[in-house]
Amino acid sequence: MKHGKRYLESAKAINRDNQYELEEAVALVKQNATAKFDETIEAHIRTGCDGRHADQQIRGSVSLPHGTGKSVRVLVFAKDAKADEAKNAGADFVGAEELIPKIQNEGWLDFDAVIATPDMMSVIGRLGRILGPKGLMPNPKVGTVTMDIENAVKDIKAGKIEYRLDKTNIVHVPVGKASFDQEKLVDNLNALFDALIKARPAAVKGQYLKSITLTSTMGPGVKISPAKVMQQG
C-alpha cells in the first residue's frame, strides 16, 4: 500500500517497535492527525480469543464518557406508543414493516445504529443478511432490542458504542476525534479497556489482549502496551 508524503513524515516520529504508555500514544496520534478534516481516532485491539468458538466470542457495548464526536443517525423499529417514544427521544428514523422493502430493495442504509422493540424482531429477521455483516442488527446483548426505547436512543446519541470481534479476532472501535483534548481521549480509551477486560470470556487461555494500536483516519498507527492496560484493569 502506497502512502503519501504527509503519512511518511508522520511515521518518522513513531518507533514502530515501541509500545507506548497510553497518554504518550494519544499525544503522538493527535500530533500526527494533520489532515484538513477532524480525523477520527480509532483503537484496534487484537485479542487471544478464537471467535470460531461460541464461548470465546466478545460482543457488548460501552458508553464513552465524552462520546465519539460523531453525529449518530438512529433508526428505530417500533409501533404505536413506542414509536412516539422513539421520536420524542430524538431518533432520526422510526417505522415498522414499511421500512423493510426500502432497505431490502432500495438499498437504503442512511443510519448508523438500529434499535428495535422485541415484538419487531420477527420482522427485522428478514434483514439479517443486509444488517448483520454491517454490524447493524439489533441485539439484546448490547441493549438494542429493548422496551426502554427512550434510554436506548439517548445512550447511543450520547456516545454508546458497540464492540465485537471481527473474523480475525480484532476489535475495531472509534474512541473520539483528533480535536478532543488528550484527557478526554484517555478517559474514553480507559472506559473501553475496562469494558473489554470485564467481557473476557472464561474460555480464553493465555494472553487476552495481544496488541493494541491507536490510529487516526489518515495517520500511522501507534502501539500501546497491552500489559500496562491489563494492569490498570
Image (cartoon, helix red, strand yellow):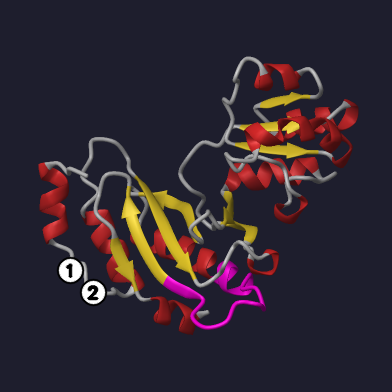
Question: Any magenta on residue 39?
Answer: no
Task: Name the mark on residue 15.
Answer: 1
> Dot 1 surroundings within 10 Å: few (below 14), some, or many (20 or more)?
few
Which percent across, then down, holds residue 225? 36, 76
Give the amino acid type for the residue marked by disc 2 in the picture.
Answer: Asn
Q: Nearer the viewer, residue 80 or 205?
A: 205
What residue is at 56 percent from the left and 48 percent from the top? 159
Eyeballing the image, is 90 above or below 61?
Answer: above
Kindly indicate whether the residue at mark 2 contacts the one at mark 1 (C-beta within 8 angstroms).
yes
Eyeballing the image, is 173 above or below 19?
Answer: above
What residue is at 23 percent from the left and 35 percent from the top? 36
Which percent across, then down, holds residue 2? 17, 43
Which percent across, then down, holds residue 185? 41, 59
Question: Any magenta on residue 198?
Answer: yes
Residue 201 figure quarter = bottom right
Q: Which residues are magenta?
A: 194-210
> Disc 2 on helix, strand or loop?
loop
